[in-house]
Image (cartoon, coloured by chain):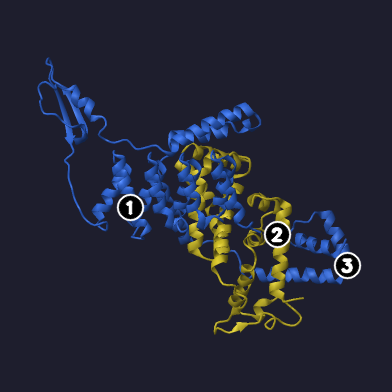
Amino acid sequence: MQARASEMELIREAQAGSRAAFDALVRQYEQQVLRLALHLTGSEHDAEDIYQEAFLKAFRYIGNFRFECSFYTWIYRIVTNLCLDQLRRRKTRREDQAVVLDHSGDEIDLLASVSDNRSFSNPARELDRKVLGERIQAALDKLTPRERMVFELKHYQGLRLRTIGEMLNTTEETAKNTLFRATKKLRTQLAGLR
Amino acid sequence: MNCELAHERIVLAAYGELPDEQIHELDRHLSSCAECREEREQLQAMRTLAAVCPVLEPPANLVARSRLRLEEALDALPPKRWYERLSEKLGNNFAGLQAAPVGAALLLVIGMGAGMLGGYEYSQGRVAHAAVAAQAAAPMQNPLVIAPSNVSSISSIVQQPNSGVVEVRFNQVVPQQIQGSLDDPAIRQLLMMASADAASEGVRDDSVGLLAAECRAGHSCQAAGIRDALMVALRYDRNEGVREKALKGLEPYVAQDMRVRDAVLEALLNDNDPRIRTEAINVLGPVEADTTVRQVLYSVANSDQSPQIRNVSRQVLSRVPQIQ
């Protein structure tokens, strides 16, 4: 409660024009913003751009923040929108990667490299971790930007579906359905056709 | 419980989102349904695989680099004008008036007035004050007529004791002239100064036109700060012709430079010339799918004074597919 009260004071001071107060707010959230942007984009350069745009936008529009939601949700709403824009731009630029290549440039058949009894519990025993990571990434790239965003926020960032709905300016129910679609697609990509 | 519902609840349970009473119900279903048990194993396998790409803490140098870049950008921003702060404050203090039509209408009028003022403030020339002080001295004893435009500042005024003599110290502008190509840094610097500071609309129009042409031709538009000068002209110049030229000069950069995009969005929201607002919509074409752009288009579609602009905004919004 005390931490929240002091954050409210910082926000009010920043709204009144205090640069020091805004800098303090940046310090509170910058790690989380970069962590999300870095994991989602896989690029330090893109993560840095998202950080820059998000906090500049926050600085410009902090006067419009009316304490109707938490500042955390407000900042994340800005960040997720920017990440969505980034994902959409990537999707239109990137060719459809239906296959994953190994170090020598040969295609990898995901099914062939997985044991017949589908023992996923110890993937490190069967596959090189880096190659496996690339396959996961390829599967994630096949999600729509919104599915990717919801899966990222739920699976990797551990947020509640209700919070995810608020951040994406939608309902918890919609976020839930998007998660279902995302997990179904990923299962299909990673385990082969049923 | 049917299997389709069970599959959804398996996902929710895996992510800790299933209420306790539904967990028990799901367990009962799973105890008698092999297919759903397989589904749960598949989901767990997927989650295990996904964990191969862990979330990592950002490296310290990335944090430091990002912070430094942000600080530089914030330092470069102009301070908010008084009417911008007032407008924000009114919006915050009267947020509850949404349910009160009279109060809300009053707020809208005040906000619109502040917004129109805020878009087009023009920075004052530095020589404006000189004429009054110089003429207050003893014009009869100094036949030399000083043109106010040649005076850059008055540094002191001293009246000598027991006399009517006043001493005025002033700094005088010495007119100069240079010529060179548009690649010449000195020429570019003067053009950028003229775009923001020239008292004559014609001079500002010429300078912005030349700078905009440089940007459209792709001639080192950013390194020399030309893009910034065009954004200032778009935001603050009182002459719509100057603003239109600035907008055209910025068009090639709207997709790659977020500041340009935001400047164009501001023009779309706040410019009082419908031609500028219409042109802004055209310029935003390459980024019309961006979330921020869509939000502004939505606002314009509902609230712009011009029916034609409202219509065009709606057309653009309907053209861009909904994001899934």
In this picture, residue A174 sits left or right of residue B143: right
The amino acid type found where label 3 is placed reads Ser
Let me know if marks 3 and 1 both belong to one chain.
yes
Mark 3 lies on a secondary structure that is helix
For chain B, give the colour: blue
Residue A189, compared with residue A17, is above or below; it is below
Q: Chain of mark 2?
A: A
Q: Chain of mark 3?
A: B
Circles 3, 1 touching at the beta carbon (< 8 Å): no
Q: Which class describes the residues within 10 Å of circle 3: few (<14), some (14-19), or many (20+)?
A: few
Write down the residue under mark 3: B31
Q: Can you tell which of label 3 and label 1 is closer to the viewer? A: 1
Residue A2 sits in quarter = top right
Q: Chain of mark 1?
A: B
Q: Which residue appears at 13% of the width and 17% of the height?
A: B164
Write down the residue under mark 2: A178
Q: Can you tell which of label 3 and label 2 is closer to the viewer? A: 2
For chain A, give the colour: yellow
Residue A99 sits in quarter = bottom right
Residue A48 in picture, x, y percent from top left: 48, 59
Residue B257 in picture, x, y percent from top left: 45, 56
- What separation in Å lies between label 3 and label 2 (alpha carbons)? 27 Å
* Sequence-wise first label, 3 or 1: 3
Residue B107 in picture, x, y percent from top left: 56, 30
Write down the residue under mark 1: B211
Mark 2 lies on a secondary structure that is helix
Camera-nearest residue between B196 and B27: B196
- What separation in Å lies between label 3 and label 1 (alpha carbons)? 74 Å
Circles 3, 2 touching at the beta carbon (< 8 Å): no
Residue B75 visible in this rendered orientation of the protein:
no
Q: Which residue appears at 60% of the width and 56% of the height?
A: B320
